[in-house]
Amino acid sequence: MPPPGVCMSIMRERHKKEGVGSLANPEKHSNQDFQQLTQYCLARGVRYIDEMFPPDHNSIGDGLLSPDNMGRVVWLRPAKMVQYPDFVVDGLSRFDFGQGMVGDCWFLASIGALTFQKHILEQVVPLNQSFKEDYCGIFHFRFWRFGRWVDVVIDDKLPTVDGRLIFVHSKTPNEFWPALLEKAYAKVCGSYADMNSGTPAEAMMDFTGGVHITFKLTDAPPNLWDLLFRAAKSKSLIGCGTPQGETSANTVAPNGLVRGHAYTVTGVKQIMSQGMLVNLIRLFNPWGQGEWKGDWSDKSSMWQTVSPDDRKMCLSVEEDGEFWMTMKHFCEHFVDVDICCLCPDFLDGNSTCHWTPSFHDGRWVAGTTAGGCLNFPNSFWINPQYRVKIGGLSGVCSETQGDNNMLVSLMQKPDKRNRRLVKSLHIGFSIFEVSDHFKGQSGKFPASFFNNNVPVAQSKNYLNAREVMEFFRLKPGEYLIVPSTFKPNETASFILSILSKAETHIHENSNDQDMEDILFSPKTPKPTSTDKFEYNGGDVDDKRTLFQKYSDEFEEVNAEQLQSCLNENLIQGNVKKTQGFSLESCRSMLALMDTSITGKLNVAEFLRLWRKVTVYKDIFFRTDEDRSGMLSLSELRNAIMASGIRVGDDMLNLMALRYGGCSGIISLESFISLVLRMDCMAKIFRQLNDGGVISLQESEWMYISMYT
């Protein structure tokens, strides 16, 4: 059984600091080690079968094939399809493959772009794989998945009908790298069916881990052709798409273009025709056939108006899915163009200017850190906040007025294994300049900051998309970036990526803050500590009398006695919706306060516990603004801070998930339990740490964790 998710999260952060998840040291997808699995199979003389992505109907997925076709599927290794299979035959090319029965033209168009960038392609497709030396039916590929590189292991059993591949297939029958690459990507998506429909940008990002830029052709910049020309020279991957037709089917228009289809931009060239310069774009249809029939198509008479050298260099009259068209026709017949690159230096043509990247994982959790957009001024401030200090441009970077010096990208991370089940939210971000009044403040900025400041830059729209990004020009200074969903109380994870030409320092703006002056409005006054407590309707100064009432003959209180004491004396009529303290909660509180490890509380331990629970009860009701007898998750933030505990957004999110559950409300019992646990666990750490680090033997760790 794998360790709990919170443990895995800590391990991932540690691994990230150690370089795991980088291209040089990718994370092992599904915890499968390619080298170990290969050695295991070779030592035992067996062919590998991937238990995590088995050769069965689950890996194909629902709704992709008809029941009849699904029943005819046979998973075969390449050696069962051809006599002499090869991984690669005569190099890798966009002309190697054709699309199959899954609607992944977006993925195949991206592969077409990938074949132009050999250094990137070899990162994704390790070429030292074959069906000859040390063959045992196992292959692996690498993808960038939401902030980290992963190495994906597969077996080479491929789905066939009547002995033929039903998904992507090579035009050379004995070449199998395209089919195996598609299978590996289907594994990270969840199934082949999960690859049905998408955009080239998604796959291109997963091939490079780079910067993604989209241009809508209805609102294209006037220098788009220059940008494409420079992007093509700067080793970028470029894809594009046609508008959807009347149905979702990929029908072919009279002009030869496929509706609702992804294409690869494979060439950008300026050519002389009849004494005039013509800007041409070369495009590739991942079907491997079906081409544009208009001007500058393969059989167009326009090619007779250029020099023989240009005609020889550019024209290939073959039904291979590749064709030329003018920039004007490109903008008329396509809806967008996606550029993915390692560095956006093509934007201003300055290849000597270095862009510095910074990546930050974050999460919106309903009630605690999901405040919605600026349309919701009372909750916007609870969104994650990132503090950015921007210096001047480096010496090699241009200072031309109007140049952008910062790119901000916000990408949603899926919380489902299957790609088709992922629900995208409308996301965006706002950037505020930090005023002098707040420059010295540490921690999260309050609602008052956003009420008195307007964004200096922001994403144009909140989009229901995997990623939104914008370029900006920001002068040197200090800024606050706030990513958000459009509506409040929507839970999702994200990656905030910031690339800057200037020297930039970025950190999350959530920890080490004094929130008292911010949190307590007249509705929620600051709590006051008192030794008095309510007991049967009256004030009693001597708490020992209460202890003696419930203690045994040895002057100790066990969990059952503590439960009776709390429910009969702490729970009052103003607690409307609580069932009281459960026996399990009382056992937990007793264990946290039991210094003698007897399973009981003596009078001193009981008095310490009582002082704490009465203070926490006071805080609970002072922060319960609607007097419901329960805390909402937004009220929980106030109550935690009022308890004197300083926590970041990540810890607050965990509290909401652990104690709020699906209801999103916290009972008095749950609140006292969680605050008491936080307080006691912090004290345990302070007692046992050495230089800020705890070192425990397994027996010591189990000893602490099993009783607290």
Image (cartoon, helix red, strand yellow):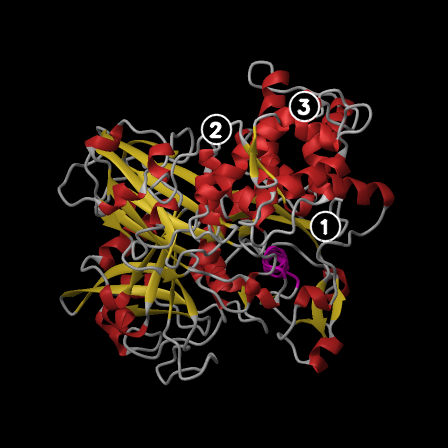
> Along the line of sight, which residue is nearer the eye, 283 or 659?
659
Residue 125 visible within the image = no
Q: Which residues are magenta?
A: 174-190
Distance Cα–Cα, label 1 vs label 2: 66 Å
The amino acid at mark 3 is: Glu
- Helix or strand or loop: what does disc 3 sit on? helix
Instruction: Give the label on residue 605, or none.
Output: 3
- Helix or strand or loop: what does disc 2 sit on? loop
Q: Earlier in the sequence, mark 1 or mark 3?
A: 1
From the viewer's perspective, is the residue at label 1 or at label 3 nearer?
Answer: 3
Pointer 3 with pointer 2, Cβ within 8 A: no
> Along the line of sight, which residue is nearer the eye, 115 or 241?
241
* Residue 343 image point, x, y percent: 35, 43
Pointer 1 with pointer 2, Cβ within 8 A: no
Q: Earlier in the sequence, mark 1 or mark 2?
A: 1
Dot 1 alpha-carbon crowd within 10 angstroms: few under 14, some 14 to 19, many 20 or more: many
Instruction: Give the label on residue 529, or none.
Output: 2
Q: Quadrant of residue 680?
A: top right
Q: Which residue is mark 1?
A: 138
The verdict on residue 187 being magenta is yes
Instruction: Give the label on residue 103, or none.
Output: none
485 is higher (above) or lower (below) than 408: below
Residue at the image point whose x is 21% and y is 28% from the top: 395
The amino acid at mark 1 is: Ile
Q: Is residue 501 found left or right of 119 in the rendered image?
A: left
Dot 2 alpha-carbon crowd within 10 angstroms: few under 14, some 14 to 19, many 20 or more: few
* Residue 529 image point, x, y percent: 48, 28
Q: Is residue 234 found left or right of 466 in the rendered image?
A: left
Q: Is residue 379 found left or right of 669 in the rendered image?
A: left
